[in-house]
Amino acid sequence: MLKYGLSTVLAMGLSVGIAVAQTNLVTNGDFEGGSTDPFVTYGAATVSLATDGAFDGAASAKVTVDTAGANFWDSGFQYNANIQFAAGTTYTWAAFVKAESAKNINFKPELAVDPWSGFGEAMTAIGTDWAEYHVEFSAPSLVTPASLTMHIAENDVDFWIDNVRWYEGTYVPGNTPTAVEPEGKAATTWASLKTR
């Protein structure tokens, strides 16, 4: 039986790049719970559960934008389930998003009441294929009530969102599902797979 000291085990772990898991502060960010709660919309937009073409798993949320607004913030998609931003804490808000056609979405972590102060706000160009978009932010003082808001009224293009994450720390890329292609036999070798 082999025995390793703690320093050897730590060195081995570091050499293979162990990733530290982020604690997701979002509830139902993968929409696999059978609903879109606690995500909501305001303005000329609605959110519904989509069960085809999800980024990962069986479901995503589809956000329908009925009309463009006079201002890009006239409609929005929000996660504001009794949350707050702690003072001086670095957060990352990330999500996989795709749109029916080109669309700009304004990611705005914000104070959820007037004057709607924003933190790390970013207008983001969304494409038609699933991709992960993110903002990093911090607030100089406690923000309560807070909201993770997406301003979506620049145009009336609908979009889908999946695997929403909000966590303490700087951005760490989200997991990308790996397609498994069965070969019809269990004896497929790594050498034959890696040459594809």
Image (cartoon, helix red, strand yellow):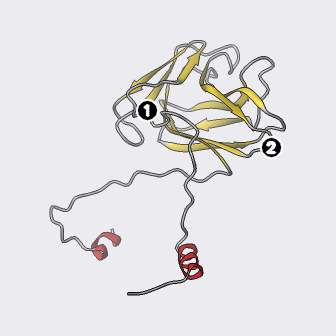
Q: Is residue 59 left or right of residue 106?
A: left
* Secondary structure under the numbered disc 1 in the rendered image: loop
Q: What is the x, y in percent for residue 92?
A: 66, 44
Q: CA distance from mark 2 to mark 1?
A: 30 Å
Task: Kindly indicate whether the residue at mark 1 contacts the one at mark 2 (C-beta within 8 angstroms).
Answer: no
* Mark toward the viewer: 2 or 1: 2
Q: How many marks?
A: 2
Along the viewing direction, whichever of 65 and 164 lies nearer the viewer: 164
Q: What is the x, y in percent for residue 148?
A: 65, 30
Q: Image quadrant for the N terminus?
A: bottom left
Per the rendering, the mark at residue 4 is none
Which amino acid is tagged 1? Phe
Q: Residue furthest right?
A: 140
Residue under pointer 1: 31
On the image, which quarter does residue 77 sit in?
top right
- Could you tell me which residue is drawn at 55 percent across and 44 percent down? 132
- Could you tell me which residue is drawn at 60 percent across and 80 percent down? 7
Residue 182 position (above or below residue 63): below
Along the viewing direction, whichever of 6 and 81 lies nearer the viewer: 6
- Could you tell me which residue is drawn at 57 percent across and 59 percent down? 20
Q: Image quadrant for the C terminus?
A: bottom left
Q: What is the x, y in percent for residue 147?
A: 67, 27
Residue 32 position (above or below residue 196): above
Residue under pointer 2: 88
Which amino acid is tagged 2? Gly
Q: Is residue 150 visible?
A: no
Q: Residue furthest left?
A: 184
On the image, which quarter does residue 82 sit in?
top right
The mark that comes first in sequence, 2 or 1, is 1
Q: What is the x, y in percent for residue 37?
A: 48, 24
Q: Is residue 136 visible?
A: yes
